[in-house]
Amino acid sequence: MRKVITYGTYDLLHRGHVRLLERAKALGDYLVVGVTADGFDKVRGKLNVSQTLNERMRAVQELGIADEVIVEEYEGQKIDDIRRMGIDVFTVGSDWVGKFDYLKEYCDVVYLDRTQGVSSTELRAESGHLRMGYVGKRVLVEKYLRESTFVNGVDPTCAMLDSDESLAGCGLVEQVYDFDEIVGRCDAIYLASHPNQHYGQIKRALEAGKHVLCESPIASTRETCQELQALARSKGLVLADAVKTAYSTAYHRLLLLAKSGHIGRVLSVRAVCTSLVDLGSEDISSVEGKWTSSKAWGPAALLPILQLLGTDYRSADFVRADLEGHAGFDAFGEIRLAFEDGYGEAVFGKAAKSEGSLVVSGTDGYIYVPAPWWKTDYFEVRKEDSSQNKRYFFQLDGEGIRNELVEFARAAERGGKCGLYIDDSVSAAIAGLLGQFDASKDHIELSPIKLGSDTCGEGVAR
Ligand code: CTP
């Protein structure tokens, strides 16, 4: 019996796939089809596959051409499969000519002519583009614009900065100067404006029927955040929290490991995010509309605590050190959350430096993520018996932004929240806690930090 194998993504199965499979089958007596797992596709740079692995495998199976359908999960698996299954012929379409010649050592390699005029990429494109507008802080707008170019289905349309700067150097989209114009021209808005502006801008965008991806916190109180979430739901729109860390594979896997009991019961989560910024060069004459350390870092530092321990904390305590002469401008802070059965500590600062690590402690071990944990591709699970320690590595594309945009576009297409990695309850808790941090009168107040003598002011971007 002559065994043939072929591999592919098989997204939105089309006649090109069917013809390829028919001819592959005709090369022998038994056909094995390898369908690429979602994670493997991401590593290969195919970010926006529309269907799940299950849907794609089922579609191939239902054609009735393949004798066996398997999952392709890792680099180099083809060699393993060919050896293990005793394959005689490996085949793929002619778009891969030469690429798999290295398999000639193990079996025959045949490239079949690709069917002209059809591809999954084109079919995905036909299913619609999300015209995206970008609003707010230049450094973030530019990052999201750059990452959008890697995501099919997202069309950067125009951008508006919250400063007088020009986007000319970036050259990706037209710069506009009016929020309503951007709302009018786009299907979705990425908001990186100061949190004080979020409520008004999000409301205008949602009322105009536009999806919103918003830098955290979404609003300045839990209640206003929940009001906006309800408005989005009632209109079938997406209002997503843009903490990019949530979308990085390493962080996401870490959550899953911790939640499935790998370190026993999770007792505490300590997350530290600091960057020494030259505050002397920032305009901090008034606190209004300024990126204090809690605004800049609070959401990221709170995220793992709320995602691992939940949003039902029993008490919240606040520690802060303001800048001398700028009451209300927190340059360092901590939020300490006590839960019924756990404890969380979020530490953030723009005029203080610490190890930017994440430590999740459990009854059976702990998870350690070295600095900068919020954009990591790596973490370790450590046990009492160090021979049981494990290191986990994952690819990190665009600090998680790329994947975030893919999931946002997918959720928008489906008119709901599916695929998003941050629950509404977590977004609302972040908004609530940071609102309380600002408003609280009974925080533990450290003496103010003096610019110049207490700090030397290194410029580090977020
Ligand atoms: N294929 C083909 N003719 C086409 C499209 C695909 O023969 N018009 C073949 C590919 O060469 C490959 C198999 O079908 O051997 C699975 O291809 P896949 O990458 O899943 O499909 P594409 O349509 O090429 O997907 P994409 O546009 O995402 O690259």
Image (cartoon, rainbow, N blue to C red):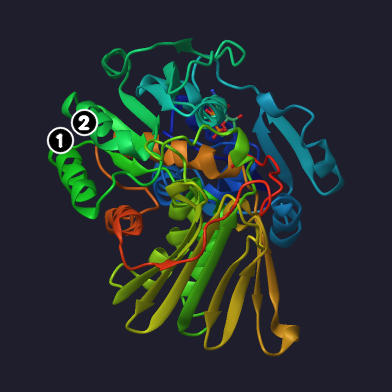
Disc 2 target residue: 206
Work out whether 409 lies above or below 122: below
Quadrant in the picture for the C terminus: top right
Give me the C-alpha separation between circle 1 and circle 2. 8 Å
Q: Amino acid at mark 2?
A: Leu
**Above or below for 341 versus 171:** below
Q: Secondary structure at mark 2?
A: helix
Image marks 1 and 2: residues in contact by CB distance under 8 Å: yes
Q: Nearer the viewer, residue 172 or 87?
A: 172
Query: Does residue 37 appear in the picture of this structure?
Result: no
Q: Nearer the viewer, residue 233 or 220?
A: 220
Residue 93 falls in which quadrant of the image?
top right
Q: 287 or 167, which is in the foreground?
A: 287
Name the element at disc 1: loop
* Residue at the right extreme, as displayed: 105
Q: Residue at x 68, y 39 (%)?
A: 459
The image's mark for residue 235 is 1
Q: Residues within 10 Å of mark 2 (few under 14, many from 20)?
A: many
Viewer-closest of 202 and 146: 202
Looking at the image, the residue that sits furthest to the left is: 234
Q: Earlier in the sequence, mark 1 or mark 2?
A: 2
Q: Amino acid at mark 1?
A: Lys
Left or right of 141, for residue 229:
left
In the picture, measured across the screen, residue 83 lies left or right of residue 275, that is: right
Measuring from the top left, give residue 453's x and y in whole percent: 68, 51
